Amino acid sequence: MKKINIILASALFCVSFLGSCKVGGLELQENYEYKPGSTVNPNLNKSALQYLRDRGKTPLIANDTVFKYMQLGLEYAGIDPAEYEKAGRTFIFLSNNAVRQFPVGTTPGNGFWYTFPILEKNPDGTQKYAADGITPVTHPATSWNEYSPTTVRNYFLSLIGQGDLGFNNLTSVNQSLTSILPVGTVAGRESALGYLVVNAEPALNTSGARTLTFDYRTPSTGKGFDLESKFNLKQTNTDFSPMVLNDANNVATGGLIATNGQIHVMSTTAVPSRY
């Protein structure tokens, strides 16, 4: 198994599914090729908060706004920035694609706004269903404002782990980390997230990949967030993505070392439940 840090500590951002790299959020013409025995210094020499801001709305390097939509979500939710300066934590960061990547041609969308769309309502406020009377009518969100501030706040809290998990201590077996989200938190019902069924064991498709299940008829079965407010990380032996979150999402860039913890960056939806 390759215990490697596939990272570029400042402007370089490698996308796991395509194997391509981006500088300042702009895709390069050539793919990044991992060369055994070669690593890049993972130390950022700054806090997680500063790293977020340096690549957010007002980037340190022109056009390097890879965390712009994450920063907008944090501000909309009213999360104290100090949460990203506290020591001994593991931070799941969201690139812009992890928030707002929509379908392109036959390629399905992989952003949070697409994975957990907004439920449309009838004039009387009840759920609007398709002609079959079963399928709810939804639309992908176009901004964080379509979710309640509470839902967005809880989502980001679920992605901050209390403790250190990274390439230095991960194995091929899932390891759990408790987030700072209060145990028992339930997602709001304005989006599909509030109807995400959280099971005791993962639901897998015929290829062995995790699938998401939504129950709109008996919403009491939905939680949205992990029952114990934890998330899982493990290593894999694949070149493009040596780290996986909650058996559902490949980590695009893992093992970034901030002065107050580790950062793992997602380029697709970070599903906030282990099973």
Image (spheres, rainbow, N blue to C red):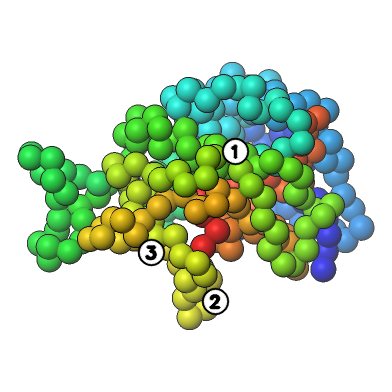
Compared to residue 129, the image places residue 205 above or below, namely below
Q: Amino acid at mark 2?
A: Gly
Q: Secondary structure at mark 3?
A: loop
Q: Position of residue 86 (x, y in %)?
A: 71, 28
Do tag 3 and tag 2 residues touch (Cβ < 8 Å)? no
Q: Which label is found at residue 225? A: none
Q: To which residue does mark 2 refer?
A: 208
Looking at marks 3 and 1 on the same chain, the residue that comes earlier in the sequence is marked by 1
Residue at the extreme left: 124
For the residue pair 16 and 20, the one nearer the viewer reads as 16
For marks 1 and 2, the one nearer the N-term is 1
Q: Quadrant of the N terminus?
A: bottom right
Q: Which residue is mark 3?
A: 213
Task: Residue at the far right: name it.
Answer: 37
What residue is rendered at 48% in x and 80% in y?
206
Looking at the image, which residue is at 20% across and 45% down? 120
Give the residue type at disc 1: Ile
Q: CA distance from mark 3 to mark 2?
A: 15 Å
Specify few, some or many for label 1: CA neighbours under 10 Å numbering under 14, 14-19, or 20 or more: some
Residue 216 x %, y %: 26, 58
Q: Tell me the residue at 8%/39% (across/down).
A: 123
Query: Mark 3 or 1, which is nearer the eye?
Result: 1
Asked whether residue 174 is in view, the answer is yes
Asked if one can make out residue 97 in the rendered structure from this viewpoint, the answer is no
Quarter of the image for residue 146 reads: top left
Residue type pointed to by label 3: Thr
175 vs 188, left or right, is: right
Residue at image mark 1: 180
Callout 1–callout 2 Cβ contact below 8 Å: no
